[in-house]
Amino acid sequence: MEYRQLRQFVAVAEELHFGRAAERLGMTQPPLSQAIQRLEMELGVTLFTRTHRSVELTAVGRQILPHAQRVIAEAARLPVLARRYAAGELGVLRLAFVSTADYGIVPELLRQYREQWPNMTIELREATSDVQIEALLAGEIDAGIVIGGARPSMLDYRPLRRESLVVALPEGWGAGIPEESGIELATIAGQPLLLFPRRIAPALHDVVTGCFAERGLTPVFGQVAIQMQTIVSLVSAGLGYALVPESIRQLQRSGARYAPLEGASPIIETGLIWPRRNPPVAVRNLLRMLGNLDQGGDGENVPV
């Protein structure tokens, strides 16, 4: 059954008059009558009972009419849907993010995006930076929020936030030192340092180890973990300390506390990464939103 045949059937069924239905369709009555007859032959059923004075739907015709009307209504919506998909007003944004971004960047970014494109579906995926790069190259995600650092040339990057690293340490360490007071790294450097493996977060790993090198210290590496929540939980268990982005202060664990570093604090950058060539319209809209925020648009800015 073709779309044209559906329109003809629905027109006759709604008008119950071949003349009026033909006029509605912009055709003459004889070809319409012939088209309905061919449709009935193709289906192997009778759709209309015809007399010289009236046209009535058969029981089968009445039952399939709502289905045909729905198909026509859906088809009429296709041009509007196509334009909305092309504009990024409908569709899916597949966004991955590192665990450190969950405590500052991601909630605000999603709030802003949802306000501007409320009908978009956002599929979130937590993943380390290296996994995100592989997923982008494989076309499995549209964009990712990663720890800034080296990336393949076919991917583009935009910084979102720069923040200091602070010390996450067990509550029993440095007892009596106010939380706002800086911690001398030399006083805890002999304890186990909890850290991401370099392969999954080389930029963060290098910033942390560089902090020790600048102070002439050598860290004692302890447990390795790939999730920031896990690292802070290990800290709360007294298994060591960690240098973490300042936004992680929002992640509270009983038995763990946060304190700034004494002296110059290392800076870590988090940014958005996406395919350089032909990014999806959902990503282009996201970049446009970030650009408007930078220029003082409505709403709170995603820190950069």
Image: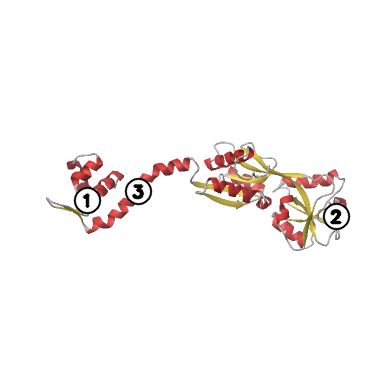
User: 283 or 153: nearer the eye?
Assistant: 283
Sequence-wise, which precedes: disc 3 or disc 1? 1
* Residue at image coords 39%, 44%: 78
Q: Earlier in the sequence, mark 2 or mark 1?
A: 1
Q: How is the image coloured?
A: secondary structure
Q: Are marks 2 and 1 in contact (CB under 8 Å)?
A: no
**The image quarter in which residue 57 lies:** bottom left
Q: Quadrant of the image for the C terminus?
A: top right
Alpha carbon separation for disc pair 2 and 3:
69 Å
Q: How many marks?
A: 3
Task: Say whether disc 2 or disc 3 marks the residue closer to the N-terminus.
Answer: 3
- Residue type for callout 2: Ile
Q: Secondary structure at mark 2?
A: helix
> What residue would you read off at disc 1?
40
Q: How far is the residue under mark 2 from the one under mark 1?
A: 86 Å
From the top left corner, tell me how far across and down residue 83 is, in percent: 44, 40
Residue topped by disc 3: 73
* Residue positioned 75% across, 60% down in the render: 234
| Residue 15, x across and y down, in percent | 22, 49
| Distance between mark 3 and mark 1 Cα atoms | 22 Å
Say whether residue 148 is left or right of residue 216: left
Q: Amino acid at mark 3?
A: Ala
Q: Crowding near pointer 3: few (<14 within 10 Å), some, many (20+)?
A: few
**Mark sitting on residue 188:** 2
Q: Residues within 10 Å of mark 1 (few under 14, many from 20)?
A: some
Q: Residues within 10 Å of mark 2 (few under 14, many from 20)?
A: some
Secondary structure category for the residue under label 3: helix
